[in-house]
Amino acid sequence: MNMIKLGVNVDHVATLRQARMTYEPDPVTAAGLADLGGADIITIHLREDRRHIQDRDLDLLRQTVFTKLNLEMATSQEIVDIAIRLKPEQITLVPEKRQEITTEGGLSVTSQKEVLADIIRKFKDNDIYVSLFIDPDRDQIMASGEVGAQAVELHTGNYANAKSEKQSVEMLEVLKEGVKIAQDAGLMVNAGHGLTYKNTGPIVECMDVEELHIGHSIVSRAIFVGIKRAVKEMKDIIYKHYLIKQNLRVPKV
Ligand code: PXP
């Protein structure tokens, strides 16, 4: 199994900038520093209401990210057109509600199979890799394969919000089962949402995923330690638990 890649979501750097409608802090600078800290992927969400990331950020990130740019987006025609013009390496389709604080649940694939199949075809025709952000639910996973997605990002929110050790173990089992179903359906599997410096280790040890997408916790730590170091510290956690999973010795630091 390869080392899990880390996608750093810099939306919340833009959230802080938009609080004053000014030019700082710049998520483009944050992405550059995250890259220096070892980010494998830069993730941003261009929301229809432009509450954090702006079109200018996406334009500049397209010109400056040379690892992998993952654009989270809803299925709106306006954003689909922007994505096809700018060609991020990967798009992740997410549900979007105006009133929500962050993306709450996974996308319902089962209820909009035709719409999704059509959009996914367009992206694939433009060589853009398509992932769907879904709950670890068998029907949603199977439907993701049926509509032509190449990957799914399993929503880790229920695990992250678990109120007890028992609940957290149960949620990990649900995620593990989700990974198996998705892999059997030929899908690449990613995961994310609500992951922190405390709860990411068990995810690395239990889930055979390719990418983790983490935003709020890394940006929060970055306020105190800087984003380069915050990213490196998350990469170190992923590496340590990857070694544990492989029964390899963890070097003392
Ligand atoms: N993955 C997806 C699809 C998301 O929508 C988000 C939030 O923007 C994340 C991962 C990152 O979640 P968090 O900010 O809780 O780490």
Image (cartoon, helix red, strand yellow):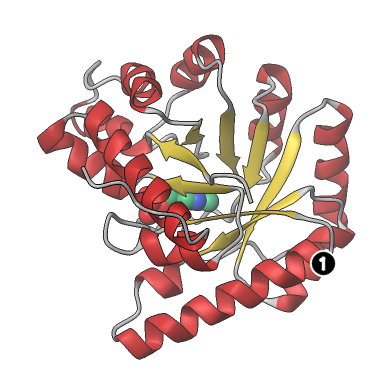
Q: Which residue is mark 1?
A: 184
Residue farthest toward the bottom in the current orientation of the protein: 166
- Residue drawn at x 25%, y 15% is 23
Locate residue 32 relative to residue 187 in the image: left or right.
left
Can you give x and y, in whole percent of width and height, for residue 144 in the image? 78, 60
Q: Is residue 242 above or below residue 30?
A: below
Residue 30 in view (yes/no): yes
Percent across and percent down for residue 180 are 71, 70
Query: Pointer 1: residues within 10 angstroms few (<14), some, or many (20+)?
Result: few
Instruction: In the displayed orientation, state which residue is furthest to the front.
Output: 249
Would you say the beta carbon of the disc 1 residue lies within 8 angstroms of ligand 1? no
Q: Is residue 104 visible?
A: no
- Amino acid type assigned to the residue bearing label 1 in the image: Asp
Q: Quadrant of the C terminus?
A: top left
Residue 69 quadrant: top right
Count of picture labels: 1
Image location of residue 194, percent across then percent down = 37, 60
Query: Camera-side residue: 79 or 165?
Result: 165
Viewer-proximal residue among 115 and 59: 59
**In the image, residue 14 above or below residue 36:** below
Image side of residue 180 versus residue 216, left or right:
right
Q: Residue at x 82, y 27 (%)?
A: 127
| Tag 1 secondary structure | helix
The location of residue 117, given as percent across then percent down, is 86, 51
Q: Looking at the picture, does residue 250 appear above or below residue 244? A: above
> Who's the residue at 50% across and 49% down the image?
212
Which residue occupies 32% across, 30% down?
Answer: 14
Q: Is residue 234 left or right of residue 49?
A: left
